[in-house]
Amino acid sequence: MNIGVCGAGTIASWISDILEQLNDEKIVKYGVASAFPEQCPPFAEKYGWKKIYATYEEMMSDEDIDLIYIAVPNHLHLEVCMQALEHGKNVVVEKPFAVNYNQAKAMIDKAKEKNVFLSEALWPAFLPSRKIIDDIIASDRIGDVTGGKLVGIGNVMFLERVKKLETGGGALLDMGPYTLGRMTNHFGNKVLSVTGRFEKLDTGVDSKDFYTVEYENGVKVECISTIDSPEEEREEWGEIYGTKGSIWFNVLSNPDTIEIRDLDGNVIDRPELPELIRNREMHFVSGYEHEWIAFEKAIREGKKQTDEAPWEQTLTIAKVMTDLREQAGIVFPFE
């Protein structure tokens, strides 16, 4: 599977390094294109991409490219994805898949029309930790699931794009895919309603989101996402409550600690987690290999979506984020 990457920024570099370490002959770092062409030669040389394209159009017209990975700013996901789909390419889109529900549905509808593979690069859905938690839930060790809490209090204000309406910024689109991805992984997609309150930056984007998602079966999940919290307030964890106990994990995206607790909060088990490939420059980044192994397998088997991050999940996340932004009164200028 020859990969063509649109964008030569941070996320693309992280994935490039981990794929190089994975060294799977079925997954080939083939070509790169960028809106800033001067970034491509050093990127390709550093990370071992075989070919440089002058434009996205040139890349998408190359018959040797099997899959296009879209790693451009949020507000450009729709445009670049639709361009790749029109060329009949399989496509993976970096999170957030789209900035609103209508865009997400249009992208998926186009993939159906073209009969090609399309997936959100929601990498936590593919990690071994996700299956470990799902298996605990299925085992009845915590009983019937009654609710949960997902907390991602952090600060990413060093990223200019998260501060701006014109680039699709804000806490919902930056942290939301992690929070809502984790939620849909373990609680499902049958969302009944969502209500929230929000704090905003002077630029108009949301900086702190506090919301509750209610499911059709009555289960409620409380969520907190921030992008501008002081260092001393930073914390990240999730807990799934059941009638017999709970599952606690220390990171929303990629936990390295999972605990099964009884109803009094006592830890009764800590499942062992497998080693993941770590990015050599940013050691806290790890595990991207699992989504790429899943993408290659799905395409080889003729599937148009993955079992781990199906279109239904992508649409649920997009719908919840769209409803919350409507409640917050946040409209992007390109919508």
Image: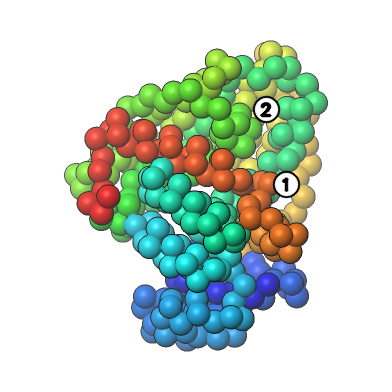
On the image, which quarter does residue 77 sit in?
Answer: bottom left
Q: Is residue 277 left or right of residue 204?
A: right
Q: Please tell me the numbered disc located at residue 70.
A: none
Q: Secondary structure at mark 1?
A: helix
Q: Is residue 126 left or right of residue 84?
A: right
Q: Residues within 10 Å of mark 2 (few under 14, many from 20)?
A: many
Q: Is residue 231 visible?
A: no
Q: Secondary structure at mark 2?
A: strand
Residue at screen point 56% across, 46% down: 311
Residue at screen point 42% across, 25% down: 194
Is tag 1's residue or tag 2's residue first in the polypeptide sequence? 1
Q: Amino acid at mark 2?
A: Ile
Q: Residues within 10 Å of mark 1 (few under 14, many from 20)?
A: some
**Quick check: marks 1 and 2 in contact, CB under 8 Å?**
no
Residue 106 image point, x, y percent: 43, 51
Q: Please identify the residue farthest to the left as the structure is shown.
A: 202
As displayed, is residue 282 above or below residue 136? below
- Name the front one of labels 1 and 2: 1
Q: Which residue is mark 1?
A: 128
Residue at screen point 36% across, 78% down: 36
Residue 109 image point, x, y percent: 49, 51
Q: Which residue is mark 2?
A: 247
Q: Is residue 198 left or right of residue 257?
A: left
Q: Amino acid at mark 1?
A: Pro
Residue 216 image point, x, y percent: 54, 19
Q: Name the foreground residue: 231 vs 44.
A: 44
Q: CA distance from mark 1 to mark 2?
A: 15 Å
Q: Is residue 277 left or right of residue 73?
A: right
On the image, which quarter does residue 243 sit in?
Answer: top right
Residue 111 image point, x, y percent: 53, 57
Location of the N terminus by quadrant is bottom right
